[in-house]
Image: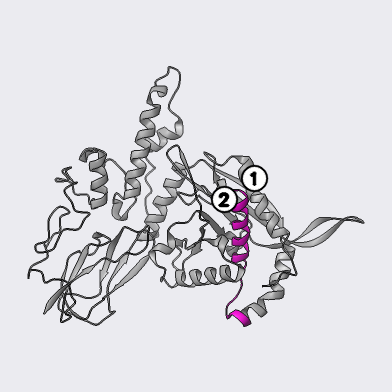
């Protein structure tokens, strides 16, 4: 009999760690090939880890709610397979796993190396190996780490939290001298962020229901608060006449569904217009790191989707500008269905460079969305309504019934000025208004 070391698999280019949510196979359980061993969660997506071998579960190396890095040994499976990894000792598990404690008989992973020289003893807070390594490189003390607010599960400090802190610290040091100039006070917003005011106590009456936020809702809440504190939000609005777009879709939707086996919604049409406008105004497709503007080459459009439980998730259409309308429609439908079913892969919610949200789905005519960090802009499309509108014709102005829609673009005024934001949302509207009603698909 051999013992196989089950590793936390790679879940995407931008996913480095995951939280163990639930073990589905316990010590002593028989395991068939491809049986689901456990459920894990990244920042936004829950996933299942299948077994690459058949055998029997021997040990769990991580408890539920523990955070594991990609490549960590998370369980030991006893198997007859000759190709299994080298046998390990009979007692590979430490009952309470400490970050710097070796597992007997198991080779240490590259992330657990001699580089970690900062002492993390005496802290009840969990720090991943990557966070520890960065802290050691930046000479951050334990006391300093303890003061950094974490956005991970249970307030855990993530890599992004630490990098953002290091960047803001560098920026603060660079501007410290100028802040000492007499007569110049620290901005009120900065004071509010550094020292939030205590909120008034809210008591629950006997008739009130107390609902504890689930894990995803906590992540969303932290993400929204962080975005408002990071970006200078501004919103610009445009009203678009999308009559040709509506008439075209009504004309082709039956044939499209019969030919492709799925529906064509308005979302891929909006996504195509956004991708074209980004090509015209690429400085909307950027992110900000300190004082640097990172101009993104790829156009990856996130589409905000509401889940049945009321939470929100943003799957990403990668390289949206390289897809034709059929490809966009299939990508939108596939991501939307798997989002509702909870079957998205972790990497499918990562790497977005711009976000599109359809508030019209809920009957809203417009909205002021919050930017999805680290992006700098998000477009909300409202409900399409029939309204009287003035049309200019060769015989004079006339009033006609038209299909109208509001578009609202929230953008980061640190790097996107009003002129750029206004021109961008206007260009999206132009592409929608000038839709070719005879277009073939």
Of the pair 102 and 373, the residue shown nearer to us: 102
- For residue 294, above or below residue 437: above
Residue, disc 1: 422
Task: Indicate the position of residue 291 as horizontal and vertical percent values.
Answer: 45, 37
Residue 329: within the magenta? no
Residue, disc 2: 368
Q: In which quarter of the image is residue 183?
A: top left
What is the magenta segment's predominant secondary structure? helix
Residue at point 32% right, 44% down? Answer: 162
Residue 259: within the magenta? yes
Task: Indicate the position of residue 99 as horizontal and vertical percent values.
Answer: 17, 54
Tell me which segment is drawn in magenta: 258-281
Quarter of the image containing the C terminus? Answer: bottom right
Residue at point 37% right, 62% down? Answer: 12
Task: Indicate the position of residue 101 as horizontal and vertical percent values.
Answer: 12, 55
Say few, some or many: other residues with alpha carbon within 10 Å of mark 2 (under 14 / 14 to 19 / 20 or more).
some
Residue sitting farthest toward the right: 395
Q: In this view, does 162 lie to the left or right of 1?
A: right
Q: Is residue 308 left or right of residue 12?
A: right
Residue sitting farthest toward the front: 83
Residue at point 31% right, 57% down? Answer: 16
Say few, some or many: other residues with alpha carbon within 10 Å of mark 1 (under 14 / 14 to 19 / 20 or more).
some
Q: Quadrant of residue 8?
A: bottom left
- The numbered dot on residue 350 is none
Of the pair 140 and 367, the residue shown nearer to us: 140
SS of the residue under disc 2: loop
């Amino acid at each position: 009999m051999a013992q196989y070391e089950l590793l936390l698999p790679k879940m995407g280019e931008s996913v480095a760690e995951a939280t163990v949510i639930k073990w589905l196979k316990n010590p002593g359980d028989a395991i068939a090939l491809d049986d689901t061993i456990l459920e894990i969660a990244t920042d936004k997506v829950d996933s299942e880890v299948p077994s690459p071998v058949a055998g029997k579960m021997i040990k769990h190396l991580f408890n539920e709610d523990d955070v594991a890095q990609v490549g960590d040994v998370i369980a030991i499976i006893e198997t007859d397979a000759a190709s299994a990894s080298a046998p390990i000792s009979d007692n590979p598990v430490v009952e309470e796993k400490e970050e710097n404690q070796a597992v007997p008989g198991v080779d240490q992973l590259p992330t657990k190396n001699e580089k970690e020289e900062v002492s993390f003893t005496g802290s009840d807070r969990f720090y991943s190996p990557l966070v520890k390594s960065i802290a050691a490189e930046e000479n951050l003390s334990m006391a300093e780490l303890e003061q950094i607010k974490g956005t991970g599960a249970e307030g855990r400090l993530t890599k992004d939290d630490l990098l953002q802190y290091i960047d803001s610290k560098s920026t603060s040091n660079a501007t410290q001298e100028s802040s000492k100039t007499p007569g110049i006070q620290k901005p009120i917003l900065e004071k509010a962020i550094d020292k939030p005011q205590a909120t008034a106590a809210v008591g629950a009456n006997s008739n009130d229901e107390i609902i504890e936020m689930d894990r995803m809702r906590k992540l969303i809440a932290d993400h929204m608060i962080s975005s408002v504190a990071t970006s200078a939000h501004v919103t610009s609005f445009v009203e678009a006449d999308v009559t040709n777009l509506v008439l075209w879709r009504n004309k082709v939707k039956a044939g499209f569904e019969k030919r492709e086996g799925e529906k064509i919604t308005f979302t891929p049409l909006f996504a195509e217009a956004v991708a074209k406008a980004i090509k015209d105004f690429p400085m909307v497709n950027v992110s900000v790191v300190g004082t640097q503007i990172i101009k993104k080459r790829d156009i990856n459009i996130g589409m905000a989707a509401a889940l049945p439980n009321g939470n929100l998730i943003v799957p990403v259409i990668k390289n949206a500008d390289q897809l034709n309308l059929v490809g966009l429609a299939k990508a939108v439908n596939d991501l939307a269905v798997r989002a509702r079913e909870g079957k998205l892969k972790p990497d499918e919610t990562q790497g977005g460079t711009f976000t599109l949200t359809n508030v019209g789905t809920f009957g809203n005519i417009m909205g002021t969305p919050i930017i999805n960090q680290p992006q700098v802009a998000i477009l909300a499309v409202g409900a399409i309504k029939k309204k009287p509108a003035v049309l200019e014709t060769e015989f004079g102005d006339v009033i006609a019934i038209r299909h109208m829609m509001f578009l609202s673009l929230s953008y980061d005024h640190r790097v996107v000025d009003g002129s750029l934001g206004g021109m961008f949302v206007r260009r999206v509207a132009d592409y929608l208004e000038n839709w070719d009603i005879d277009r073939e698909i």
